[in-house]
Image (cartoon, rainbow, N blue to C red):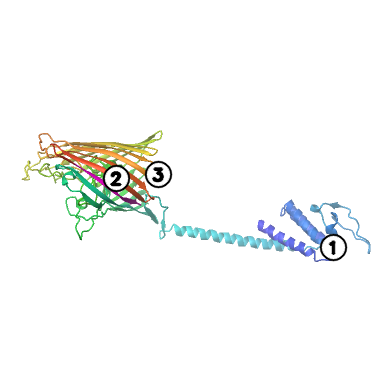
Amino acid sequence: MASKKHALFASILAASACASCFDAPAAFADDYSDLLDVLRAKGSLTQHEYDTLLAKHLHHSASPAQRSGPARTVRTSSTTSPPGAQHATPHVTHAIHGGYEDGIRFDPGAEDSASMRAQQAADRAEASARSAQEAMLSTQNALNSNSIVRVAKYVPGKGLTFKAGPVDINLSGFINGFYTYNSPAGGRPVAGGVSTGSSGFDSSAVRNGLLPAGFILKLSTTQSGIDMSAVVGMYPGINNAKNGAFNANTGGSPVGLGTAGIDLRQVYVTFGNKDVGTFKVGRDLAIFGSDAILNDATLLSVGSTGSNAAPGNTSLGRIGVGYVYADWIPQISYVSPTIHGFQGSVGVFQPLDEFNFAGEGLSAESTQHSSPMVQGKGTYDFKIGGVQTRIWASFLVQHQQALTSSLLPDDGTSHRGAMAEAGEIGAKLTYRGFQGVAYYYRGSGLGTTGLFFDGIAANGRKRASEGYYVQAMYNFTKKFKLVGSYGVSNLYQAPGESDSLLVRRNQSEVGAAYYSLTDWLNLVAEFAHTESAAHNSNRNSDNSGSAGVILLF
């Protein structure tokens, strides 16, 4: 409709402009005024448009004297005057917006011609709009095509996500490096202790912290209503690797021509959905002890060094001085949906050997397993006022078979076994800039530092162990925070045991400052004091200071 009006206006204005070319003021004006009346009656013109066009027509068709003179009246019809007589005075007059005037004859075909041009313009506009819509749909189909790779919006800390058709490809990770100076405070050796106080020498190292570097590749998609993913995590260190019982986590080898170790900790698949929960098959962080280490602030720093003179892939952080390391273990596990803040998980895991970490024949060992390790956990997230709270509790059970030691037969006839058991509970509270963590564990046959390290005495009896840590963190600004923590791990003698050299207690105090220079780069400065004590009077301690960076993407 609008395009038709534009065409009509153009035609009428052209006709009005041409009216000034005629010398005779009485030439054919009535036909033009009639057309305006017809267009107004049909609704093609509004009253305002009608008045405007008629006024322009009268202005152009009037003589100069008429333009400068008083407003004139027009007649609706004219009579024939005798030759030479003056025009008769109009017998019917009306205002300009409804009047007629002798003037230009309007071609009756002009309206049809203008209408045709307007229709053609409208058809061209419609075709152009249709073409644009088809192009837009074609572009959308191309973007949704499986052959197009797109980049999702970047979220700091969530890695880079590429969308290739129905598959999300996420790459995330971290890299860190610290200068650490360790100063032994002296003392006597403790079997199974984590302090380096009895080494007698200060040491400097450029090393990894509790975390090595990490590069995690995750592919996710949904098929037949099932959400699934495949994850591979590679964790190389920056120091030279050395072959040993702990593989990439064995103490390093700071000699020339060495190479860094590659630690493939994660290789697993998940499948499920929000209604039924998620299943996991492969190698990943275990359930028991996972919340303890993931909430430990030393995860982003160094903590207890373990060995600083010959650093391995990682430091200890608070491992062995507040909790037992969860470890990365082959598993088939299940995590339930979250219902009103509650969530549960359970799984069967590759059974691990009892290990004589203290040496000197102080602990039993095992290599036979007819049943898997079983772990489970429950969590509850809730908020009271402005305090966000998480509470968790978990358990671990594994039967250790065919135990061997210096005090037990090693002729293949021993069937001595023990059921290792452990439980833990923890809480995390967050209120504005403050965050607090409290954690406690207790085990029988669990051991200390690592799973089943020195958990069973040489006489085949289980040792009890327990530990805890408390941690407080305060964010003074969005970029700067301070952390302080204290933790203890205790290992008690088994019934009938009198090995006084065995570690009784490992403990540490840690203070650290963290500054987020950017979304990726964090600056860290830390001090840690670590002590180890045996069941006799042996004890030692050390102090370490660390400064470095950790980049997370």
Q: Nearer the viewer, mark 1 or mark 3?
A: 3
Could you tell me which secondary element the residue under label 1 belongs to? loop
Lateral position of residue 187 relative to residue 264, left or right:
left
**Residue position for label 3:** 478
* Mark sitting earlier along the chain (1/2): 1
Residue at point 57%, 59% (across, down): 129
The vertical placement of 166 against 351, above or below, is below
Q: Does the image show residue 434?
A: yes
**Kind of residue at badge 1:** Pro
**Kind of residue at badge 2:** Glu
Lateral position of residue 318 relative to residue 353, left or right:
right
Could you tell me which secondary element the residue under label 2 belongs to? strand
Q: Nearer the viewer, residue 197 or 95?
A: 197
* Mark sitting earlier along the chain (3/2): 3
**Residue position for label 1:** 25
* Mark sitting earlier along the chain (1/3): 1
Q: Is residue 422 magenta?
A: no
Q: Position of residue 491 (x, y in %)?
A: 17, 37
Other residues around mark 2 within 10 Å, as few (<14) / some (14–19) / many (≥20): many
Q: Position of residue 4 (x, y in %)?
A: 68, 58
Q: Does the image show residue 107?
A: no
Residue at point 71%, 63% (across, down): 113
Residue interval drawn in magenta: 541-553
Lateral position of residue 281 relative to residue 409, left or right:
right
Q: Main secondary structure of the magenta part?
A: strand
Q: Nearer the viewer, mark 3 or mark 2?
A: 2
Q: Position of residue 273 (x, y in %)?
A: 35, 45
Q: Position of residue 399 (x, y in %)?
A: 17, 40
**Residue position for label 2:** 526
Lateral position of residue 504 relative to residue 386, left or right:
left
Q: Nearer the viewer, residue 379 or 70?
A: 70
